[in-house]
Amino acid sequence: MSSDPWGRVDETGTVYVRTAEGEQVVGSWQAGSPEEALAYFERKYDGIVVEIGLLERRVKTTDLSAKDATTAIDHLRQQVDEHHAVGDLDALRKRLDALVATVEARREERKAQKAKQTDEAKQAKEALVAEAEELARSEQWRSAGERLRALVDTWKGLPRLDRKSDDELWHRFSHARSAFSKRRKAHFAALDAQREEARKAKEKLVTEAESLSGSTDWVGTAARYRDLMTEWKAAGRAQREAEDDLWNRFRGAQDVFFAARSEVFAERDAEQGENLKLKEELAAEAEKLVPVKDLKAARAAFRSINERWEAIGHVPRDARPKVEGRMQAVERALLESEESEWRRTNPEARARAAGLTGQLQAAVDKLRGQIDTARAQGNNARADKLAKELEGRQALLDQALKGLEEFGG
């Protein structure tokens, strides 16, 4: 008979293991010595110990599922319970019990973690739905569309919820996307219609602009081009490709007209510059006639100068007032000289002037006599009143005498 602390072999070759519940039969050994029998079943025990150790590490360090871990534990427990090994089987049972507790704790932990993840996923999806529903009312078509596409990718990365909750949230999410897509399509359909109307309107403007490009009505056509530009801006934008093509045609037609006008105006400006020089020379020639000495000769000379002036043509607009003003000043001087000559040689006017002078002289003489009489009589008040009246009559007389001198005395 042979034995160790955990087992023994009796004289019949039966192997026993010692447990808290007493000895249990492990098996029968007939092939060798009792020591070999104990060694064999101790190795089986060591094998179970190794398997339990490996399972403990897997449970602690890997994501082994609770189901698989429980299956493995049950398999090992069966080996322990069948008593086909010699060793501290009660210790192994305790380790397996502890492992069961660990697996259960991990199961609860994972359950709580999954519940937390599910709750977080639900909150995240509800937030996505709320944002999608807000974006569904947006008119920022590009940015809102891009954001909605990003929300779909985010949704796909979130865990699924229970079917009912997930389906309800997805329905709202999908409805928001569809509503936005519908509004966007309607917007761009309306925009396309507007752009088509703008294209038609601008086609007409381009046609008219091109028809005017060869016009030589510089003022009227330039004004019409300004009106066409105002109408162009008011018409709105056409489709991009059509807009660019129409604008190039419209601008090209204007360029043709304004280039031709600029060329004509440049020639006209050069011609008017030369005209200005000629008219300035004539103005200087006319100014030499003043002061007028020989009215008849001056009048003939001015008429000749004026005829040459009229034959010259236009001068630059901004220079016109000054040069014409010089000629007008000479013309006024001639008119004043003519009026003076007419007054001097007009018999009726001379007679009227002489008669008026005689009347004023008689009135002055009479007032002087009345003043002398009043003073001789000591009536100074009357004399002073008559003296003031005399001052007024004397001034009129002086003026009349001056006018009479203009008639040659």
Image (cartoon, rainbow, N blue to C red):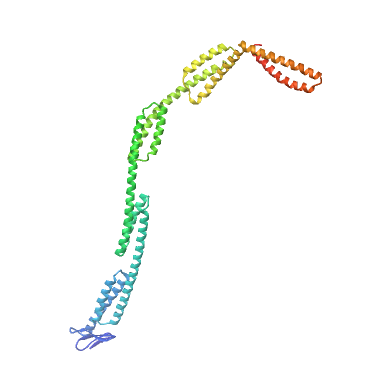
Identified at 35% across, 67% down, the residue is 116
Q: Relative to residue 118, is residue 151 depicted above or below? A: above
Q: Which corner quadrant of the image does residue 222 belong to?
A: top left
Q: In the rendered image, which quarter contains the C terminus?
A: top right
Residue 258 percent location from the top left of the image: 40, 30
Which of 394 and 164 lies nearest the eye of the viewer? 394
Q: Which corner quadrant of the image does residue 209 belong to?
A: top left
Question: Does residue 349 appear anywhere in the picture?
Answer: yes
Residue 169 percent location from the top left of the image: 32, 60
Q: Which corner quadrant of the image does residue 265 belong to?
A: top left
Q: Relative to residue 109, is residue 31 depicted above or below? A: below
Does 245 sit left or right of 8 as displayed?
right
Residue 351 percent location from the top left of the image: 64, 11
Which of 118 and 372 lies nearest the eye of the viewer? 372
Which of 352 and 280 lies nearest the eye of the viewer? 352
Which of 328 and 290 lies nearest the eye of the viewer? 328
Q: In the rendered image, which quarter contains the N terminus?
A: bottom left
- How many discs mark residues in the rendered view? 0
Does 346 sit left or right of 44 as displayed?
right
Identified at 51% across, 24% down, the residue is 319
Residue 221 percent location from the top left of the image: 40, 29
Q: Relative to residue 152, is residue 27 depicted above or below? A: below
Does 167 sit left or right of 288 as displayed?
left
Question: Does residue 239 appear anywhere in the picture?
Answer: no
